[in-house]
Image: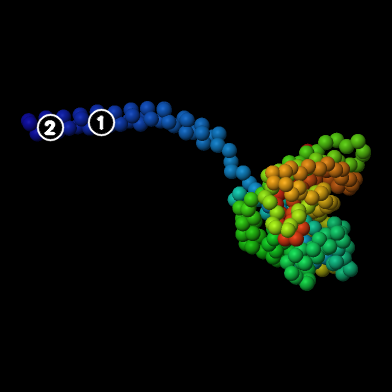
Amino acid sequence: MRKLSAIVFGVAALAVFAVAAVTLSVERTKKIGPEKKAAEANAAPAARRAVVVELFTSEGCSSCPPADALLARLEQTQPVEGAEVIPLALHVDYWNHLGWSDPFSSRQFSERQGEYAAAFGEEDVYTPQMIVDGVKEFNGGNSSLAQDAIGKAAREPKGEVLITRTPSQSEGLIHITAQVDNFPRPADGQTADVLLALTESGLASDVARGENEGRRLTHVGVVRSLKALGGLPEAPGATFKAETEVPVEKGWRRENLRAVVFAQERGTRRVLAAGSLKLFD
């Protein structure tokens, strides 16, 4: 009888302990659970840092379509944690003599690529060439190099860019205000320019001649215009602000247009700040 009583007492004690433990757990959930869940729900997602990815390309180059497709994937999927990829597809004109004149090409973009070559100490240019934040260049079709370079660029200090659009008094123009704050100090002896690019996505061409004859090529982030807005102030903590009007051609699809503003050192080509704004709904 003593053994049975002990067992009954032990079982009862365990039952009481179990009920107390459950009750304590419920009370802790009531006190802590909702607050923790609310904090998690209200926590802001980690900010992505803008990274400018330039692609020098051409519809007359047979090795360029894979690089164009990579640029599109980078923009659409944003695969690099902490990075907001801003694509700039700059179509060069030096392939136009081989049977197909790229409708998006410009001598200005060929000259810009030449400036990069000089900064990198290279004598020649090539397509497709991808350049990340002005400092890392490689074959534009290399996805692993692209993501690695974008990840490293996203960890570098960057300034803040604010872009606003207001109605213009003139038809066919858009009025843009650009502001750059909290930008890192340029390297010793360097000056930095602030540039404005107008880009269009959702473009396509049915190539009738040249190396890509018979192919339908699609593009994102095609640079329609590129202009300098001025130089970054040298005083620490200063703000850059500029206003300008940019023409919008009739054939451009307004819903696919973006304004991209970025600050770049003239010598090293390093991008110090970048941002973009969709111009029309």
Q: Residues within 10 Å of mark 2 (few under 14, many from 20)?
A: few
Quadrant (top left/top right/bottom left/bottom right) for the N terminus: top left
Query: Residue 17's mark?
Result: 1
**Could you say where residue 142 lies in the image, as x and y percent from the top left?**
67, 64
In whole angstroms, how far apart are the C-alphas of marks 2 and 1? 16 Å
Q: Quadrant of residue 171?
A: top right
Q: Amino acid at mark 1?
A: Phe
- Asked if residue 266 can be seen in this view, the reply is yes
Residue 74 lies, with reference to residue 29, above or below; the image says below
Q: Quadrant of the C terminus?
A: top right
Q: In which quadrant of the rendered view does residue 269 lie?
A: bottom right
Answer with left or right where residue 34 lies relative to residue 92.
left
Residue 68 visible in the snapshot: no
Q: Amino acid at mark 2?
A: Ala
* Disc sitting over residue 6 in the figure: 2
In the image, what residue occupies the spot 70% across and 64% down? 137
Q: Name the residue at the right extreme.
A: 170
Number of numbered callouts drawn: 2
12 or 17, which is in the foreground? 17
- The chosen color scheme is rainbow
Q: Position of residue 119 (x, y in %)?
A: 75, 65
Sequence-earlier tag: 2 or 1? 2
**Callout 1: SS:** helix
